[in-house]
Amino acid sequence: MENKLLQNDLLEQREGFKIEDLQGANWAFRKLRAITAKEAEIKALAEEERHRINSWEETELKQYEADKQYFEYLLSEYYKKEKAVDKKFKLSTPYGKVTARKSKKWNYEEEKLKEYIKSNNLPLIRVKEEIDKAKLKKVFKDGINEETGEIIPGIVIEEVETISVKVE
């Protein structure tokens, strides 16, 4: 309850404060600078801790990677050996199983394939069509065809003001 009253008083004070002169603006910039510095300090500390934790995690996991690969290799070899003897062999235990799946992998020689497709007039090459907006802005300044005076359809130009506050 007391904390809520304190927050309300602070909110009323903040709502009542206005910058009315250069001194007030200077004070606000000093406050912003202090807040920015504190944020940078917090972010630096957090990043340092993340780096330390990530390094620890990497070190801890690395020691198990070789063992993991070794046991996966042993299980795969056993599976292959048994599968060669019995085509219907399945390796399954309460702690895991080994499965195999056959699939087809397509490897392409792009240039030879394109040449074949083009020479046989097959509709298998796609062309992506998009507007070059940078060139459009140069050719049609302010969305108007300067040669004809025509307003280009499909363009709405808004004037947007951006105010930025930079703390030095």
Image (cartoon, rainbow, N blue to C red):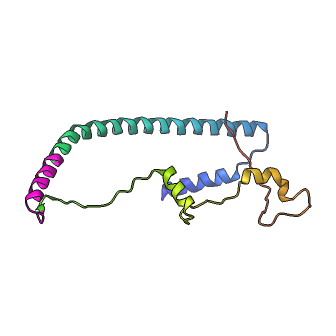
Residue at x 56%, y 59% (from the top left corner): 119
Q: Quadrant of residue 89?
A: bottom left
Of 166 and 145, nearer the camera is 145
Determine if the magenta segment contains residue 34: no
Residue 105 at x, y = what percent? 35, 57
Q: Is residue 45 above or below residue 121?
A: above
Of 27 and 69, nearer the camera is 69
Residue 48 at x, y = what percent? 42, 34
Q: Is residue 88 above or below residue 49?
A: below
Of 5 and 64, nearer the camera is 64
Q: Quadrant of the C terminus?
A: top right
Of 162 and 60, nearer the camera is 60
Determine if the magenta segment contains residue 75: yes
Residue 20 at x, y = what percent? 78, 44
Residue at x 65%, y 51% (from the top left corner): 13
Q: Is residue 163 left or right of residue 44?
A: right
Q: Quadrant of residue 88?
A: bottom left
Q: Is residue 54 visible?
A: yes
Q: Is residue 165 left or right of residue 43?
A: right
Q: Quadrant of residue 69?
A: top left
Give the extent of the magenta segment: 72-90
Q: Is residue 74 above or below residue 36?
A: below
